[in-house]
Image (tube, helix red, strand yellow):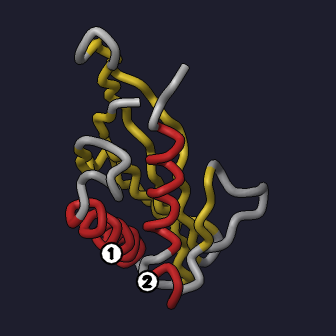
Amino acid sequence: MSTKAVAVKTALKGLLDGMAITTLDNVQVTYGFPTRSPERKWAVVGEVRWDTADWATNRSRTETFAVSVIFSVQTAGGTSAECEAYAIQLAAEFESLVSADPSIGGRCITSTFTPKSLKSWPIDGAYESQFETEVRASARP
């Protein structure tokens, strides 16, 4: 099967790696879920899910897929709201990069940043928060 999903997923990880906030705050960025001991701040380019694959012409098809992206942070002290605000700050910078180049470097026809969920919970002496989104893309393999 030919697909652009892996190329798009790899490019999304590159966007995360190049974000100013991930560099300044030492956010661990991974392709797939991190090891069993992730850092306090991490971002993952995870699951790919295909929605459709339709023939565009008699020799090519258009595929539509979603790549999950998760931002997870822990903040010592503070509040749940502060922890969620930081997760949103990470996601906002990523969204601006995807929006600035919806073709993701020419790897797809178009893409959109689609928020999915934001949640937080207390842990020993801190809060943990996760912002889950997906980048929905259309491409011709």
Q: Which quarter of the figure has residue 63?
A: top left
Query: Which quadrant would the C terminus be assigned to in this image?
Result: top left
Q: Residue at x 78, y 55 (%)?
A: 36
Q: For this rendering, which residue is in front, 11 or 56?
A: 56
| Local SS, label 1 | helix
Residue 110 in the image: state x and y as whole percent: 23, 44
Q: For this rendering, which residue is in front, 27 or 112?
A: 112
Query: Which quadrant would the N terminus be assigned to in this image?
Result: top right
Marks 1 and 2, the one that precedes in the sequence: 2
Question: Counting other residues with Cα less than 10 Å from the Cα at mark 2, is it few (<14), some (14-19), or many (20 or more)?
Answer: some
Residue type pointed to by label 1? Gln
Residue 90 in the image: state x and y as whole percent: 38, 72
Find disc 2 in the rendering and name its residue: 21
Q: Are marks 1 and 2 in contact (CB under 8 Å)?
A: yes
Find disc 1 in the rendering and name its residue: 89
Residue type pointed to by label 2? Ile
- Give the Cα separation between the discs numbered 1 and 2: 9 Å
Closer to viewer: mark 1 or mark 2: 2
| Local SS, label 2 | helix
Q: Which quarter of the figure has residue 28?
A: bottom right
Residue 15 in the image: state x and y as whole percent: 43, 67
Instruction: Farthest residue to the right: give it.
Output: 36
